[in-house]
Image: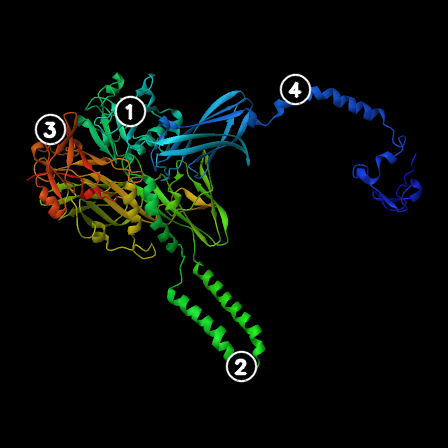
Amino acid sequence: MRERCGGSNGAGAGRVRPTGDRPTSGRPTIDRPRSDRPTGDRPTSDRPTGDRPTSDRYRRARLAALAALPLLLVLGPAAAPASAATTVGVAGAYDGTYVPGRPVAVRVQVTADRLLQGRLEVVVSDGTPVGVAVEVPGGSTKEFLVVVPGSQSFNFDGALAVQARIRDGSTDIAAGNGVIQSSVGQELVGLLPAALGGRGLPGPTALAVDAGTARFAAIGPAELAQAPASLGPVSTIAAAADELMRLPGSARSAVLTWLEQGGHLLVDADPGQTVEGLPPAWQPGQDGRAPAGRGEVRLTGGAIADGRWAGLVEPTGWALAGNPEFGMGFGGGFVGQALAEEAGLEVPRLGWLVAFLFAYVVVAGPLLFFVVRRRGRPELAWVAVPLVAVLFTAGSYAGGRGLRDTTRQVDANIISTGAGGSTANTWLGVFSAGGQTSRVRFGPGWMPVGDPNSGASSLSSLTITPDGTEASLPLEAGQFGVVPSSGPAAVEGSLEVTATALAGEQASGRVKNTTEFALDDVAVFVGTGGALVGRLGPGEEREWTVTNTDLNFAFEGGPPAEFRVWGPGNFDGFSSDDTFDLTLWEAARQIGGQEFRGPGEVVAAGWTRSFTPPVGVDGRRAGGGRSLVLGRTRMQTPAKGGALDVRREVVRAPDFRRGKGDSFVVRFITRDADVGGRTPDPSRLTVRAPVGQLETWRDGGWRTVDPVALQELERSGWAEFVLPPSSVQGDIVYVRFPAFGPGVDSNGLFTLRERA
């Protein structure tokens, strides 16, 4: 046996062994613990076989391992990762479609044969991942509805790629892919449970006119729980006569918000029947239809219960008008610049930069050369030149930091008030001095919006929780980020306005502020004109009158009404002392869509800094920013005389991005009984347009209408068309124009008039 030298030599675990312990090359060796000793310390063949006999304990361990090997081979598959037994299926909710710019609803089906807990992430078109915590019991399949912020991303075929993946931390467990298709040119009709009545979904059917087809999808509890964002692809909702009132309060409020934003609601009640759950101002009455914000309510008189869908659904402008993403993106670029200035970010004036560079060149060049030559010490230049560079660098750094000394978190808001409640669009500006990833929190029902290419800052991730949404915003050093979002606004009351058309191109009415805010520079806009009302405290009201206005909103030359009412404004930002700013107004116009300032629409607007949106960054709540408060109504017309009240909606337009479509389709409602409209003489209706051809829907097809004088088009760019009386069908007129180019201001082009 080999004798080990305990610790007498003080070497401990790495002790020196006497050379006589075994033959060596004559060098002392370090005796390592056996677990650390390299196997190559000495050849195995040189070790005496009896030096370390195998004990019974080791022999029994080997036998136990060999006996357990078959059992491990059997149990091995059960210990495999969850990904081997997890599958993910992806499909677009609502018939696999989406509307460009509006939120996208994605349905994900997860199957697992063992308990699965993790994070479900959905990515649409390489956008921001949207995640939600999920749990799937073992041996089951569970379905999840995830709402992803919309964007203006598109492919020429209208298809968008969707990926869903289950993650455990940073590890992907399983993934699935799908494709969703643009629904432009179709009307997606969502059926509430009572309207569906336990029957199967109807197949595609023809619309009321030849302008696409109607397709149908069921709206269940999961969709209603995330409404109105989850209703992004749905242009029309069908409900039983009393179904709206039977919905839970939060779901009913969400449907009303969707309606206010431009949706169309079909209620299977008889004309004149009161629809429980609708605000009084939105009740259709005997006419069977009524405006509801930017949307419309229509009674179907039992057609839904009978399954009579052919020709029941009308085309809408859901895919064209009121696109929140376009407004938050297009207008957001200007608003973001204005926020940066209000936050205190400044760019040095060009004159100062030139002067600074000139001073550096003079000091580091001729002046330094003259000084060292005069002192007879030219070698000092090796020290003086770097010193001058350091001094000027320090000065520029101090000056640059001074430009950001007043930087703060800022916000700007548009609050739309109405009978269905208030919603808000918010831009939050965040500055990072040293670079960081900020945590942005949104309240319940709020969601980031906007195209990443529109000037808004890109979010790296988005997590939806029961208490709201949280996003990660990576910012580089010195970067100013802008995050647009929208959601319900906790605002009591509204900016109420009434309007009546008068003879001689005039209109008058009253505006009342029932909100808790004091509003400055309140103004009312109708037709091509506007009037400044002034400051309105909470509960105050005032009369207004607009003169010299074209109430039917024909094409107008000269500055817009807002320039005349509020002045030229400050398009460079919010840094002026004015209470208003036209950059925010322009964003409101884009969000409002085609009919924001259309014929018969009356818009009241005021300004405040008292609104606090439920948005914050790194624990700091937004608030104190400039807010534009809006209220809208329809203009009333007297039974005799006055202007013709026409409600209008552009329901189809060419898709210039993809080169699809070749015409505009416009729907006119010639009488609005709910606001006292009068019935026009069908033989005296005219349309003025910059085209030489026009079609109306009559006798079951599109029929051509020739212009009164085609030479007028050549002379002034406009032609007038007298519509046949048969073009008016139940107070509705459909007109189709050939496409004549993008960037069209429809307010001046699509106008229905009554000849004198």
Q: Colour scheme of this structure image?
A: rainbow
Residue under circle 1?
Answer: 238
Whether 257 is drawn above or below 25: the answer is above
Residue under circle 4?
Answer: 74
User: Are the two marked residues, 3 and 4, in contact with CB atoms closer than 8 angstroms?
Assistant: no
Give SS at disc 1: strand
Which of the numbered marks, if any, corresponds to residue 373? 2
Which of the numbered marks, if any, corresponds to residue 382? none
- Mark 1 or mark 4, which has the lower sequence index? 4
Give SS at disc 2: helix
Task: Measure the C-alpha gap from mark 1 to mark 4.
Answer: 56 Å
Label 1 Cα neighbours within 10 Å, binned few <14 / some 14-19 / many ≥20: many
Q: What residue type is labelled 2?
A: Arg
Label 4 Cα neighbours within 10 Å, binned few <14 / some 14-19 / many ≥20: few
Which of the numbered marks, if any, corresponds to residue 726? 3
Q: What residue type is labelled 3?
A: Ser
Where does residue 512 sit, x and y in percent of width and height? 23, 43
Q: Which amino acid does label 4 sit on?
A: Val
